[in-house]
Image (cartoon, rainbow, N blue to C red):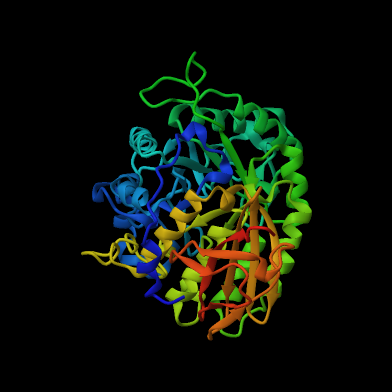
Amino acid sequence: MPIAWAAAMLVGLTLPFPPPIEGRSWEDEVVYVVIVERFADGDPANNVMARQYNKDWARYEGGFRGGDLKGVIDHLDDLDELGVTAILLYPVMQNDEHPVGKFLPTGYRPKDYERVDRNFGDLAMLQSLIDAAHARGIKVILDMPIVLPGFEHPFQTDPARKDWFGEPTAYGVRRWKVQNRQVADYIIGVARRWKERSGCDGFRIDSAHLQPPAFWKRFVAEVKSAPRRERGGGRDDEPGRHRGEFLILAELAVNPRQIGRVVSECGFDGAYDFSSLACRDVFGKTKGRDVGMLSFVNREAHQFYPAPRRMMAEVDNYEDAFAAMADEPKAARTALALTYILTLDRVPLLYPGDELGVAIREVGGAFPPGNGRRDSPVRKQVQALIALRRRERVLRRGAFTEVLARDGLYAFLRADGNDRVLVILNATDRARQFAAPIGGIAWDACRLDDLLAGGVARPARSKASVEVKALGARALRVRPAQGR
């Protein structure tokens, strides 16, 4: 996707102010994933682990290196300007404080389920972050590592709680034995307290596949019915208070058929569609997978997921940035992959660095000094794509129909009543021509309006093809010709 395209995309595209939080459904969100320890260091005074292991970082993987909740607050205006409507905050609970072998804690080894980790701040700081996000119309979802305890969780060595733990896992720690009613009550109580005290808008459940669906069914019902703190300190179970749906989202590392079954059975609001990561090879590699792989994973999604629009799609994951694995030109390939998930019928997840087309390795790396971030052509492209998704209901709620998957071109139609948008993605390093029937409409029986650059891409009753530039994309409104 040519970098010069960024300026054209911004013409006539204003960023719609999101409807109030209570007026938005999950499929309306554009989510930015914040891995707190990597994001930004707003308060160097709380860099406990960074100071302790400063001389020994080379010996370890992971660890809290300075990022904190104050750093997130400091950059909320930037995220608001980018256009995201929700942030997914990776675990903030008090973690283990010592290494296990070569691994330092990274958020998924909870030592104390009741406190915010001292490397990040405290509960008051978390509440301030959530209040500040809500003031900007941004939801906050908390990652909840409640399937497995940390190695230093005090219950691990409590003789009275020997039967609170199940079999060891691949992570080296035993999972909570939720078949024990006391354990289930404890875990659900932890979640209810975080909901009530923080005022967040939902939970992401890490490694949910490690616990049985019967537990999650109870968990979802009881946590959704629990009160939560409102901005200003009230609770949303008080008369006249309501802030929309409380989301419970699952990470389920199983196949799509099983994911769909568990989501339906347990009442989760959504889950990761890990199959969407196929786009990493399709768009990220010169000699990657054929676009037919996207055809396969989208057929699976519509076959097995109860509501594909409420599943989450990403181009990154926690460990591997898209830009780190992509071939050159990395920026163009990143922008193309993001165009895919921002026009697909999934909830898009962006990770820090995606919006710049770079892999972030250091704390604060997504916020270079000077105007490097604001002037980034990739950021302008991503901002325009987010604005397009927010403006066009059809891209959030419309049905999905594949149009073409051949010779490096992948095209699909999003349709909501008479509103139709055709998306064409070119995974090759040369310009391609596209002409094909669109969802039952003959190619020459419609006008195509360019939603990215503006203007008419092709007039009605013309048989001319449209060009899709190398590693480029088109988003075209389909308007049937009058009299057809």
Q: How many discs appear?
A: 0
User: Where does residue 307 sit, x and y in percent of width and height?
Assistant: 70, 47
- Along the viewing direction, whichever of 415 and 315 lies nearer the viewer: 415
**What is the residue that sits farthest to the front in this orientation?**
483
User: Where does residue 196 sit, x and y in percent of width and height?
Assistant: 49, 26
**What is the residue that sits farthest to the left in this orientation?**
370
- Along the viewing direction, whichever of 90 and 63 lies nearer the viewer: 90
> Can residue 4 be spotted in the picture?
yes
- Relative placement, left or right, of 377 versus 33 is left
- Along the viewing direction, whichever of 242 and 45 lies nearer the viewer: 242
User: Where does residue 200 sit, x and y in percent of width and height?
Assistant: 47, 35
User: Where does residue 218 sit, x and y in percent of width and height?
Assistant: 70, 31
Residue 48 vertical position relative to residue 278 in the rendered view, above or below:
above
- What quarter of the picture does the C terminus occupy? bottom right
**Residue under the point 32% across and 57% down:** 50
**Residue under the point 29% across and 56% down:** 51
**What is the residue that sits farthest to the top in this orientation?**
239
**Residue under the point 70% across and 49% down:** 209
- Relative placement, left or right, of 121 versus 399 is left
Residue 410 vertical position relative to residue 68 in the rendered view, above or below:
below
> Can residue 71 be spotted in the picture?
no
Residue 298 vertical position relative to residue 29 in the rendered view, above or below:
below
